[in-house]
Image (tube, grey):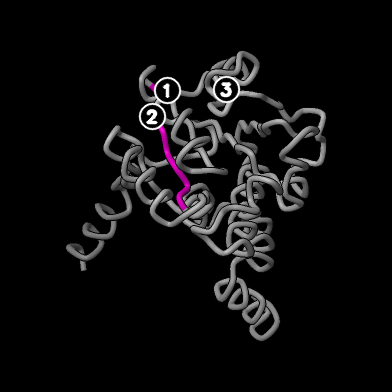
Amino acid sequence: MKKLILMVILLTSLPVVSQKPSPALLNPTNHTMVLIDFEGQMAFAATSIPMDKLRTNAAIISGASKIFNVATIVTTVAEKSFSGPVFPEVQQFYPDVSIYLDRTTMNTWEDVNAYKAITSKGKKRIVLAGLWTSVCIVGPALSALSEGYEVYIITDACGDVSTEAHEMAIQRMILAGAKPMTAMQYILELQRDWSRQETYKAVNDLMQQYGGAYGLGIQYARNMVKH
């Protein structure tokens, strides 16, 4: 009996240790999200991904960045004269179009205002998504890498004029040091722990709407088991 009591005392006195996550993981405060040229004219020629899937993934990452208060920049190219308005899925979460940064440069990094906006956030990690992969994503990705930034590319929230153009662009960026990820991976990496109640409902609401089969599972659980 005394041995049992001693064991209980020893076990309950041990400190609770949680494993530290990898510093390579994204969290809401360690990166800047840059949404690039999610516009109609840029989308019309994109064939590397079905347009409904691209719009869905744009909604997931836009919603995720809003839910987690990620430092986010929305940039457009020749919005009024050529490319047209931003996707509704982006405007849903960033409705103030006056904050969008319009450019003439294909490479966001070469635009003075966009460059200042991105670098002034003070984050050494940059997450990129948009159209087209081989031009408007490759440009800032390689440029940021050359200045010592870590670059992440949300590959299924990018599109191009052909599958080959998209895939060659992704390979080029990976070879240069960029890190690929997907839209769903992005939002779940930010949530990380379902006990984080401050974002739990918003994340599940977003995924119920845009998460495909996963979203249907959330709806089912909420209605059938009252989760």
* Residue that sits furthest to the bottom in the current view: 224
- What's the CA distance linking mark 3 and mark 1? 12 Å
Would residue 17 be seen by someone viewing this image from the given angle? no
Q: Which residue is mark 3?
A: 118
Q: Is residue 205 magenta?
A: no
Three-letter residue code for mark 3: Ile
> Which residue is identified by label 2?
150
Of the residues under marks 2 and 3, which one precedes in the sequence? 3
82 sits to left or right of 182: right
Density class for disc 1 (Cα within 10 Å; few <14, some 14-19, many ≥20) is some
Please identify the quarter of the rendering in which residue 111 is found. Answer: top right
Q: Amino acid at mark 2?
A: Glu
**Residue under the point 58% across and 78% down:** 217
Q: CA distance from mark 2 to mark 3?
A: 13 Å
Q: Label 2 neighbourhood size at 10 Å, few (<14), some (14-19), many (20+)?
A: some
Residue corresponding to mark 1: 143
Image: magenta residue range: 149-155
Could you tell me residue 158's position as x and y percent?
Answer: 52, 49
Label 3 CA crowd tier, 10 Å (few <14, some 14–19, many 20+): many
When the figure is inspected, residue 145 is found, relative to residue 192, above or below; the finding is above
Q: Position of residue 48 (x, y in %)?
A: 49, 58
